[in-house]
Image: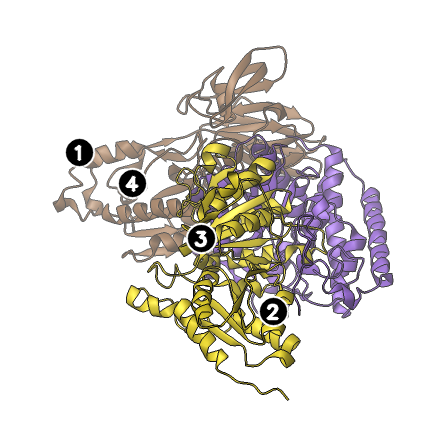
Amino acid sequence: MTRTASIVGIIVNPNAGKDIRRLVTPATHTSDVTKVGIVRRAIVAAFESGASKVLLMPDNHRLAERASDGIKGDIEVLDMPLSGSRFDTITAAHLFCQAQVGAVIALGGDGTSRDVAIGWPDAPLIAISTGTNNVFPSAIDGTSAGAAAAFVASGAVCLSVVGRRSKKVVIKIDDRDKSLDDLALVDLAFINSMFVGARAVRDPHTVHAVIACVATPASTGLSSIAGRIHPVGRWETGGVFVRLGAGGRKVRVPLAPGSFTTMEIAEVRPLGEGEKISLSGKTMLAFDGERDLPVSEFGTVTAHIETTGPLLIDVERTLVLAAQALMFDETARHISEENHVY
Amino acid sequence: MSDERKLSYGQAFNEAVSQMMEADPDVFCAGEDIGAFGGVFGTFLGLQAKFGEHRVVDTPISEQAIVGLGVGASVTGLRPIVDLMFMDFICVALDQIVNQAAKLKYMFGGEASLPMTITTAGGGGLSAAAQHSQSLEALLCHIPGLKVVMPSNPYDMKGLMISCIKDNNPTVMIKHKRLLGMSAVVPTEAYEIPLGKGNILRPGTDVTIVAYARMANEALIAAAELAKEGIECEIIDPRTLQPLDADLIVDSAKKTNRVVVVHEAVRFGGLGGEIASQIQELAFDYLDAPVTRIGAPFSPVPFSPALEQHYIPDAKTILAGVREIMQRNVIRG
Amino acid sequence: MEISTTKQFDLHRRMVRIRLFEEAAGRLAEANRLPGFLHLYVGEEAVASGVCGALNDDDHITSTHRGHGHLVAKGGDFNRMMAELMGKATGYCKGKGGSMHISDTSLGMLGANGIVGAGSPIAVGAAFANRYRGRGQVAVAFFGDGSTNIGAFHEAANMACALHLPIVFACENNEYGEFTPRHKTMAITDIVDRAAGYGMPGVIVDGMDVIAVHEAAVEAVERARQGGGPSLIEAKTYRYYNHHGIQNLGLKYRPDEEVATWKQRDPIFTFEDRMIENGVATREKVDEIWAELRQDIETAIQFADDSPYPTPDQIMVDVYTKSSTSNTTVGTKS
């Protein structure tokens, strides 16, 4: 394997961590200053750990420029038109793929990781949570993330050892005037709501059904509904379908951080890998917790779970392997591709 | 016996506030350090213990928001007393005082009233230097919509403060820092001294001295001295500077034919100019001499006692001013 | 929270009323029939409507120099508003306030305000009074992104949080402080980043989406009403016209393409499309509403035209409130 460069790509979603959940629950606000700090630490750590170049997604908050200001090294902010929406992340992930980026660090929520997976389905990804009730990304500091990304991008630590394929909900929507493919990394929910509105799903009474590929009681949000009845771990195969409604178990669920509600479960069905499930009729689809797409009464939504999500990089394992290979020693500062340890 | 009861100027203020808070649940106080501490000059002492934290509110050091609190609370029906520790700090809150409090009623076509009182402490003499000693009443008197009150003694303080609280307009009650300890007989019952009505502090025939706040007291000292020389001064204390009781001043001028106006504020652009101007407009033909203005020199208030004692007018300055105006001999045609 | 059909029409009506009033005011200004400055709210209708739609009649709001929309959304009367803009005696302020001071205290609308940032401290006072009386009323301070650079905003935000008052800070971030883009006047992009510094929650909503604004406003208002304290809502929005006046394109400080992009997300038209798609409204019904409200505007212009100007003897009226306790005549010799 030959590499021309060890490129780390960084995406920071400027909009994450500021939605209505801060008002209705004690969810954490993540300021731009906090995000800039994480990215800045990631860039410094990436260069420290052997990255030859850092590529950044531009954003209309200029977080990328602010985070990289004054840092010496080959730093490039992608030249791409900005929409100020989630499509910026999708575009940037796609461009990272074309630029042969070796590891992607994405700061945001579940939605941000989902957009990376849409733009680059096989992205080697470190997903940093900048919100509260995220399932897919984790709370990782920029310093560790930047170092791990660089070790992976340079090949010093092999992606096949520390990267693991995540799951996703593969979704097909057939409606009156459209046929769409989409995906979710945690859950797809069917909401009785006419409007996208403030996006976050927070009213338990509007949730009709949830298809989750990760359902953990350790999370908050939609996936925690299934997680409290039929847990499915991140690395287990398959997922679970839950239909809300009267007649079954009543479960206490933190639909938003620090805010519990009783949900009535009409049906719970485990889903095997690839097992299809179809729902028809008027609904609002929420991908990874956010209302996004209305479906008309003529629409049908078909979904299944497969293990074709992004390659999630295990940051801690990467750093342990690097330590074992003495890569933090002063003498190993200049890591070349001949220096592979695995 | 109660007629003989004496209160200090500061206590008279406190009693006025206390009695109005007892009488009207819509009255509340807000300001810096006025709660448990009782205000930096102690004028709010004991009020929070008596009326609770919800009616005597400690605020952040935020003069704009303090006055804004008064504007918003009064325009929605309460009767706030908001305190700005030092008069110099009105400058920090001037937008809320000048552009909001003073003007909302007019700009709203009359469909609002702002029964709020801004209380503050003005005047020098404490070596507090240029940012804690000013007399900025002329600034406030220039603003239509405001009423401005500066009492010269404990009795006036209580009656004027009660009138301020009861008034349905934004009023500014300026306590003079050097008068806070002044003691005098103050009736126990609540009483009002109408805003806009001046007071003849001492009747006289030869010269009128218009003086307010601490200067009224200095004028009294000067008048006692001048009486020994056979000069009988009439001292007019306007009590309220906006609205100004010009009738009282002009009537006195017509009687004595000579007027000296005294204030602690700098002479240039001070209220003395306005008073002198009204006298010449309304009583020009009665004057035997130009109106004399006594005020501070046009400099910031100096710090050192060695300087400040020469900066602020006092009985001696007034004596000199009266003697000078009395030396003018006018032959009437 | 699902928005009822009635509420959807209510929010729609508030927005259309604002749009029609502002467009009419713009046309009158163009014809030199309105004296003074005119700051139009067109483009930002979802914010005032979404927030005021979450308020009761006796809740209070403070407004900005761009204040017509807030008064309309709070239920303002077209006739008296139009008359005020023309400086007539029948106007809300009897011709003494004009566009920048338009108000209706009986609707809890404590005035548009010519001083940027000045409304927030007043809203704090109203919120204080509301809690003091204990009738469960709430105050909302509307303000723009630019006013968060003024001390008054910071003092108000801090005091509201220190005193835990029932208030909602509703920021209309239209990306320009008068003629200068936001990024030149502050080092942050989201006004909501300031909220945490005072200890209150802050959220961003799409200010071109009335439902998004309304959902957040309902939560914030309810939170305040229940004693949960202040919160800040930042609505990302855009004004179609210039800072003042009616020019919208060819402005030196912002590109025409930017205006066009925002207009594609028009708060009224996108909402109508959604209502129709949802089967809540029909195109005919929507057209009917516009036609009916257009008629109201025509009536208001006629009313204002027919109204007399105030007479010079009114200059000295309402400088002061007559006080029952004082027998002196107010005002001084002039």
Quadrant of residue B238 in the image?
bottom right
**Chain on which label 1 sits:** A
User: Which chain corresponds to the colour purple?
Assistant: C
Determine the secondary structure under disc 3: loop
Determine the secondary structure under disc 4: helix
Disc 4 target residue: A152
One can see residue C175 in this view: no
- A157 versus B287 height, above or below: above
- C239 versus B25 height, above or below: below
For the residues tagged 3 and 4, is the chain the same? no
Give the number of marks: 4
Residue C277 horizontal side relative to residue B283, left or right = right
For the residues tagged 3 and 1, is the chain the same? no
Q: Nearer the viewer, mark 2 or mark 3?
A: 2
Spot occupied by residue B284 in the image (x, y as percentages of width and height) = 63, 79
- Tag on residue B252? 2
Q: Nearer the viewer, mark 4 or mark 2?
A: 2
Please name the amino acid that badge 2 sits on: Ser
- Tag on residue C188? 3
**Chain on which label 4 sits:** A
Q: Colour of chain B?
A: yellow
Q: Colour of chain A?
A: brown
Front-most of residues C11 and A187: C11
Determine the secondary structure under disc 2: helix
Tag 1: Cα neighbours inside 10 Å, few (<14), some, or many (≥20)?
Answer: few
Q: Earlier in the sequence, mark 4 or mark 1?
A: 4
Q: Nearer the viewer, mark 3 or mark 1?
A: 3
Q: How far is disc 4 from disc 1 in space, using C-alphas?
A: 15 Å
Disc 1 target residue: A324
Q: How far is disc 1 from disc 2 in space, using C-alphas?
A: 100 Å
